[in-house]
Image (spheres, rainbow, N blue to C red):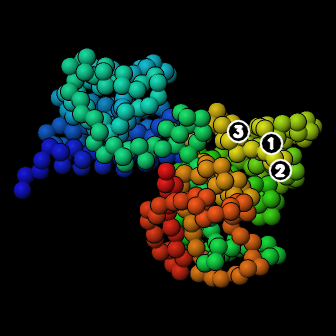
Amino acid sequence: MAVTDTERDRRHMAAALVLARRGLGQVAPNPAVGCILVHDDRVVGRGWTQPGGRPHAETEALRRAGDHARGATAYVTLEPCAHHGRTGPCAAALAAAGVARVVVATVDPDPRVSGRGLARLAAAGVATTLGVLEAEAQALNAGFFERLGGRPMVTLKLATSLDGRIATQHGDSQWITGPAARARAHLLRADHDAILVGVGTAIADDPSLTCRLPGLQGRSPIRVVADGRLRLPLTHQLVRTAGTVPTIMLAIQGTDPDRVAAFAAAGATVLAVAADAAGHPAPRPALAALAARGVTRLLVEGGGRIAASLLGAGLVDRLIWFRGALVIGGEGRPAVAALGLDRLAEARRFQLEGVARLGDDLVESYRVTA
């Protein structure tokens, strides 16, 4: 049976989306984009947004295609840019290369682009098609879209016992999950721009918050500690290594300037935000401050108070729940602190997207419902 044009477009766009995923965690504040150039049903060029956000996917694909780009169809996961930045507009580059048709998954909501890239292509006589695998493309770049609204996309990652506990009453938490689950958690770190923990978790666990998978050590996210009064010891490894791994301290306004200076001298960046009623960094201002620093995808790894704060404010977009094959009991520490709910109808609802087995552990993926 012959392949239809619609099926062909979907197949090539799916491949472009796979390429785009390579940029997640590496290109902020830019979107992660993939581009495939096809001539006579033969792929002649591939590109994806490079680390740091430049070159763009279209530029890379055109470079690799060379003269074969003329008359080709370009499959791009996000509308080609139409504005001048450090490089020229990708829409103009595609037209100048002689591309005959451009298939776009979704419009770029950035006000500098939003429809202008498609209009520029049309004005140059390039045929355009919009909306192929649109939902998939929007999901992939949800962090970029959220940041345009003033905050990053938030993924809450929990690793618990079967009964939802993260530690015994004495704080023993290593290891609830096995090696395969821990490796998957490190992979999550690699495709996020920043990773957030509360100061209590930082002090109790002494984490490095880096990606330690072989070959991906260079993809460690920015480390963020919510520490309202900057009580993390200056000898803590997160502070001692702040000069080599970017580290942000989220403090509250009015924090001791001597402490701020000490952390800055160690190489950490201190962002002062408004306090919530309990004297902790308020979640919305904290996320806005991270977005202003270019963070599009934020992974939250604990502890229970941070999880409750973000859930209570309706700021969690995705939930990744690792369940270890053990039971701790009611004395154990809960994964989420008290939310103050009176009725079940007030609970935040999530939709299950996938379940995977990792050894004896499970990992469940959810997204928030409207």
Q: Residue at x 46, y 71 (%)?
A: 356
Q: Quadrant of residue 130?
A: top left
Instruction: Return the residue nearer the eye: 302 or 25.
Output: 302
Q: Residue at x 6, y 56 (%)?
A: 1
| Numbered badge on residue 285 | 3
Circle number at residue 64: none
- In what element is the residue under mark 1? loop
Whether residue 272 is visible, yes or no, is yes
User: Could you say which disc has been placed on residue 278 in the image?
Assistant: 2
Separation (CA) of disc 1 from disc 3: 9 Å
Seen at 68% across and 73% down, the residue is 165
Q: Position of residue 99 (x, y in %)?
A: 23, 27
Q: Earlier in the sequence, mark 3 or mark 2?
A: 2
Where residue 339 appears, as percent x and y from the top left, is 70, 60
Which residue type does callout 1 highlight?
Answer: Ala
Circle 3: residue type? Pro
Location of residue 266 in the rendering, given as x and y in whole percent from the top left corner: 83, 42
Q: State the SS at label 2.
A: loop
Residue 163's place in the image compared with 9, above or below, is below
Against 261, residue 279 (above or below) is below
Comparing 97 with 131, the one in front is: 131
**How far apart are the two marked residues, 1 and 2, measured between alpha carbons?**
7 Å
Q: From the image, tell me which residue sits under label 1.
A: 275
Q: Is residue 185 visible?
A: no
State how far apart marks 3 and 2 are (Cα).
15 Å
Q: Residues at badges 1 and 2 in contact (C-beta under 8 Å)?
A: yes
How many other residues sit within 10 Å of disc 3, few (<14), some (14-19) or many (≥20)? Answer: some
Q: Residues within 10 Å of mark 1 (few under 14, many from 20)?
A: some
Q: Amino acid at mark 2?
A: Ala
